[in-house]
Amino acid sequence: MVASDAIKDDVWWGKVNKPIPQEVFDELYDKIIDSYSNTDDFYVFGERSCCCHARRCCCCSLLLLLLLLLLLLLLLLLLLLLLLLLLLLTAVLRWLLRREQEDAALDALADEERGAAPLRAQHVHPPRRQRRLGDRL
């Protein structure tokens, strides 16, 4: 590749990606054009480059797979936290119910010691309003 101003900062220059002078590129380009213009057969092969030549994998798909696995892990962690919160809420509600039952039992015991009659639940109806002439039904 020619190290032009447009791509020189975007290419990872090193052992594999080495810049060539513009004159060398032009000479190779002219040879390729002459070769293709003198033949009737032209074949195109779909190739790709990748960091792992043996498996022909794509780095982007590996990163996407890792990102999806991380997302799945975070989702499982969230579900675990929700389960723990539900268990904690259940334990607190059981403790409150037990405490209310113990308080009611202590109150009943205290009433017995004082000799008071135990309170019974009574259903109290609200007072009825008398209808007068002219009231809407």
Image (cartoon, helix red, strand yellow):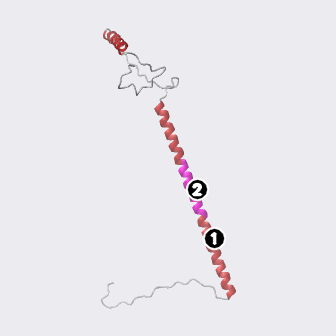
- From the viewer's perspective, is 82 left or right of 98? left
Mark 2, other Cα within 10 Å: few <14 / some 14–19 / many ≥20 = few
* Residue occupying the point 47% across, 25% down: 50
Residue 66 higher or lower than 55, as above or below: below
| Quarter location, residue 73 | top right
Name the element at disc 1.
helix
Numbered range of the magenta stretch: 76-91
The residue labelled by disc 1 is 98
Q: Residue furthest right?
A: 113
Residues at marks 2 and 1, CA–CA distance in whole angstroms: 21 Å
Instruction: Judge left or right: residue 91 versus residue 55.
Output: right
- Sooner in the amino-acid sequence: mark 2 or mark 1: 2
Q: Position of residue 102 (x, y in %)?
A: 65, 74
The residue that appears at 59% across and 59% down in the rendered structure is 87
Q: Residue at x 53, y 51 (%)?
A: 78
Q: 88 or 12: nearer the eye?
A: 12
Q: Nearer the viewer, residue 131 or 26?
A: 26
Residue 100 horizontal/vertical position (percent):
61, 73
In which quadrant is the N terminus drawn?
top left
Query: Is the C terminus in the top left, top right, bottom left or bottom right quadrant?
Result: bottom left
Name the one closer to the observer, 49 or 9: 9
Query: Of helix, strand and loop, which mostly describes the magenta segment?
Result: helix
* Magenta-span inclusion, residue 89: yes
Q: Which mark is residue 112?
A: none
Q: Position of residue 10 (x, y in %)?
A: 40, 28
Q: Does 114 appear above or below 15?
A: below
The three-letter amino acid code for the residue at tag 1 is: Arg
- Count of all numbered marks drawn on residues in the image: 2
Would you say 15 lies left or right of 32 here?
right
